[in-house]
Amino acid sequence: MLGGLVIFVSLLSLFSFYKAGFFLGNEDICHHFYGMKDFHSGFDLKALSDRVNEVLIKLDSLQDKLESKVQQMEKNKDALANSNITKMEYKKYLEDEVIRPLYSAHIALRQIRLPKSEGIRNSTFKEEPLINTFIIEEIRKYISPKENRVGKVNIYGSERVHNTIGHACVLYEKELEEYMDYDIGSYCKDDWNMAQKLMIHGCDPLPRRRCLTRASKVYQKPYPINESLWRMPDHRNVRWSNYRCRNFECLSSKNPQRGYSKCAGCFEMEKEKLKWVTNTALTSDFLISDILAIKPGEIRIGLDFGVGTGTFAARMRENNVTIITTALNLGAPFNEMIALRGLVPLYITLNQRLPFFDNTMDLIHTTGFLDGWIDLMLMDFIMFDWDRVLRPGGLLWIDRFFCNRKDLDDYMYMFLQFRYKKHKWAISPKSDDEVYLSAVLEKPPRAI
């Protein structure tokens, strides 16, 4: 009986591909795959080929398994003739070893999407981007373009909405599918660290999810704003499961097991209170009061791009300046800390274009992040993006950028290439081989 089943499955597989036209040279498929140049430009043949190969491998594996079982039964036919296989055992074998793998291959084959006429008034063929790359249905639903319900152009001037993911997501297919494998409407897994890993490796932006984010089970009401700026938050308001520490006290710079290295001391308020308001021995340390005096009353909004817990934004808030602080949770709850202080964290990586319009920021401040490790080409793209969002007359504050002394000229060029006006410029030694560079530069008008 199993031998007959093997023959049946094989014939079924051949018939499926025969019907699809893979063996007969079906005119339409040949026309699509081999005859239309424009079709190639909008269609990912490799993704389709990979998906078809995946189905073939599943069917091949199933056939090998069944043939092996038949051969085994042939060798033991005498013993098999005297054995009593119940119908339930036979049913279980069919379900586990035949139906389930066959169903998996069937679904994978059905999920292949060929291009279709695109648009309400556009008859060109175009593939839905990356649709044949992923198997998890939730990802496929997310990246599929959403046609306007009324069949008209929407408020944005388009006929559909394309949800985006980072192009590097295809390199982390397994991790992304694990991230998107959840029960819709239920609680998400506590996997923000996986999401951040994907973001850092270029899978950014991540797809939205339709599950409920988890919060601390003992979440407490945040402190009022007149207390929260300079008071350590309640540790009960953080989910600590993906950190080495389990409370804010553990994050002290005195603890070698704190789990992070950048910005040591950032979680100690007594140290943070001294930053940008007290003089130090370094000429490259500037005070906030001196910088604001360069443009009295003109600095209203800005961006702090670095690693920290929001202290720069807190000090600027005391001067009626609104600062958005970029943050990643690199071994410690930087985002949670900033938010619990009553400030605005921006969860963003170096990979991403700043989500601000052109010529809108009065100030961009950076410290502790863009240092001598950064590739010059990457830094060039970042600097041009900062120039884009900084308004004419806005200030770029480079705060204690450090690099190897021999590389200083290269980085100085990066900062000076835009021909900003120099308000402050200081270089001081960090070690025998490294130096600090601090500068306050003003963007020119460039009226065209």
Image (spheres, rainbow, N blue to C red):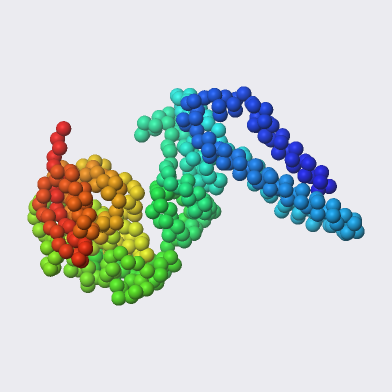
* The C terminus sits in image quarter: top left
Q: Residue at the location (19% across, 48% down)?
A: 413
Q: Nearer the viewer, residue 3 or 146?
A: 3
Counting from the top left corner in percent of width and height, residue 184 is at 52, 51
Residue at 41% x, 45% y is 166
Of residues 291 and 239, the one drawn nearer to the viewer in this rendering:
291
> Image point 36% across, 31% down: which residue?
157
**Number of numbered markers:** 0
Name the one closer to the observer, 367 or 346: 367
Q: Residue at x 66, y 46 (%)?
A: 58
Answer with left or right where residue 243 lies relative to residue 408.
right
User: Is residue 142 positioned above or below 308 on the image?
Assistant: above
How far across and how far down the image is residue 333, in percent?
35, 64
Locate residue 397: give its quadrant.
Answer: bottom left
Query: Farthest residue toward the bottom?
Result: 254
Whether residue 301 is visible here, answered yes or no, is no
- Could you say which quadrant of the image residue 424 lies in? bottom left
**Can you see residue 269?**
yes
> Residue 253, position in %: x, y?
29, 72
Q: Nearer the viewer, residue 33 or 179?
A: 33
**Residue 233 higher or lower than 20, as above or below:** below
Please indicate whether residue 375 sits to the left or right of residue 218 in the image. left
Q: Is residue 323 left or right of residue 164?
A: left
Residue 340 image position (x, y, % from top left)? 31, 63
